[in-house]
Amino acid sequence: MARDLPRYTVPSLTPEDGAELAAILQGRLHALNDLALTLKHIHWNVVGPHFIAVHEMIDPQVDAVRAMVDAIAERIATLGVAPQGTPGALVKARTWDDYSIGRASTTAHLGALDEVYVGVITDHRKAAEAAEALDDVTNDLLIGHLHDLELFHWFVRAHLESAGGELSTAGASTERDAAAAADRADA
């Protein structure tokens, strides 16, 4: 794929490598911006007996994801490319559907969020693998993010797991299916 080459990039990388890394990171920037907005949406729209626990669990995740967004945008700029952080750029580039759950139980939102995290983490791992051959610094940035994203995913799954270790969302492949499965298990 032809892309504009930066006029400069970090020492020891070619402009082609800088452009490739920036493109990888741009996809993660969009995904993490979307995740931060989705988390805030969930924060505002959870209801039910576990409201306060989930409401308060989500805000630190929002803050951490926003910090990841900033780090990725700054790495893109360091590579000599302008990061694209506008809503229009995100919507145009994304390959996933908008979060589909409105006001709903904490269990339904956590079920849907389980699927969201699966998608974000899977794509983040692919980005880290792609960056690994090109640049240790970019790879390290993505690996650090994975640590936190996987931790947040565990927090979500702990609410969905039975005492026997079964996830209420097992087998679900969409947000809506996961939300419904989580609600059924909680009933």
Image: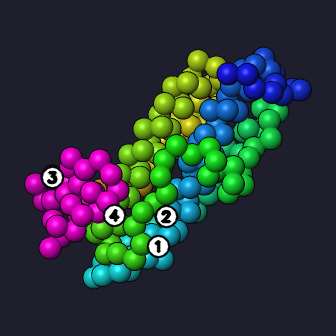
Question: Which residue, given by chain and number where applicable, does mark 4 sit on?
Answer: 110
User: Is residue 65 among the parts visible in the rendering?
Assistant: no
Q: What is the C-alpha distance between the residues marked 2 and 3?
A: 24 Å
Q: Which residues are magenta?
A: 159-187
The residue to which callout 3 is attached is 166
The reply to whether callout 2 and callout 1 are in contact (CB within 8 Å) is: yes
Above or below, 42 against 29 in this view is below
Residue occupying the point 67% across, 32% down: 23
**Front: mark 3 or 4:** 4
Distance of label 3 from label 1 (alpha carbons): 25 Å
Task: Tell me if label 2 and label 3 are in contact, CB under 8 Å.
Answer: no
| Amino acid on which the number 4 mark rests in the picture | Leu
Front residue of 120 and 68: 120
Q: Secondary structure at mark 3?
A: loop
Q: Which residue is mark 2?
A: 39
Q: Residue beneath label 1, please?
A: 43
